[in-house]
Image (spheres, rainbow, N blue to C red):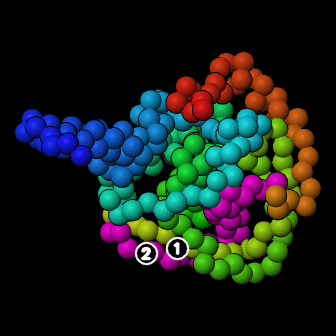
Amino acid sequence: MKKQNTFLRLAVPVLLCGILIAGCRLSGSRSGFTREERRILFEQDSILYVTVVTDPSDSLILRTPCADLSDKMLKSKDFRLFSEKLKATVQAPWEDGVGIAAPQVGISRSVICVQRFDKEGEPFEVYPNIRIDSLFGAVTLSTEGCLSVPDLRGYVPRREGAVISYTDPETLTRVSETVRDFTAVIFQHECDHLDGILYTDRADSVFFSERSAAERMYYDSLGYYVKPSVLIR
Ligand SMILES: [Zn+2]
């Protein structure tokens, strides 16, 4: 190897460092969310596009198991925005859901939002790094639909109750809770999403819902289901 002159000996490492730093900025952020995840959160309005199984690239996201959020991510402003947008999306008139999981907005992270029918005021709450630790009680058939499975409903065997645990984003400690009845069904449905499982995988039978199809057609005509460029891969 030939000897390099002084300029090259200094300039090359500096240039390489610059490229490395620029690369880090492109692939990640201070909050820990990836550049693509931040684009999904920041390049859409308060209500996010919901992925559907009828779209091949959406379907891939829906079938991908999710990763946990780090403490840094949970403490970030990005996570607070993520929580707000999940709540707004599940409550949008054209979605009208009782629960939503992060893959349904294109983000493969272990976060769900559930309407707590067992609490006063039936609030929507967000649960990061959630697990179902155990299930108990009888198995009954629940009638389920999913924001990501348009026009269908199904009869799904679910257990009566569940012991769940999740990370409290304020204290960063694990919290354990027991839920029952319809609330437990919602938790089971949403936690399945985090493993890439849809209710149709577990259903005894599925059927076409005319009402759901008519509603979707109506809102589609108003342009509410257009996939944003940030999610076109
Ligand atoms: Zn669902």
- The disc, 1 or 2, on the residue closer to the chain's N-terminal end is 1
Residue 198 in magenta?
yes
Image: 143 above or below 85: below
Q: Residue at x 56, y 27 (%)?
A: 228
- Residue at 66% x, 27% y: name it: 225
Residue 191 horizontal/vertical position (percent): 63, 62
Q: Residues within 10 Å of mark 1 (few under 14, many from 20)?
A: some
Q: Residue 205 occupies which quadrant of the picture?
A: bottom right
Judging depth in this view, the residue of 10 and 212 nearest the camera is 10
**Residue at which label 1 appears:** 165
On screen, residue 21 above or below 45: below
Whether tag 1 and tag 2 are in contact, CB under 8 A, the answer is: yes
- The foreground one among 103 and 3 is 3
- Left or right placement of residue 218 versus residue 209 in this view: left
Q: Which mark is residue 174?
A: 2
Horizontal and vertical percent for residue 143? Answer: 82, 56
Residue 134 image point, x, y percent: 65, 80
Left/right placement of residue 126 relative to residue 203 reads left
Is the residue at mark 2 in contact range of ligand 1, meaning its CB lies under 8 Å from it?
A: no
Q: Is residue 139 magenta?
A: no
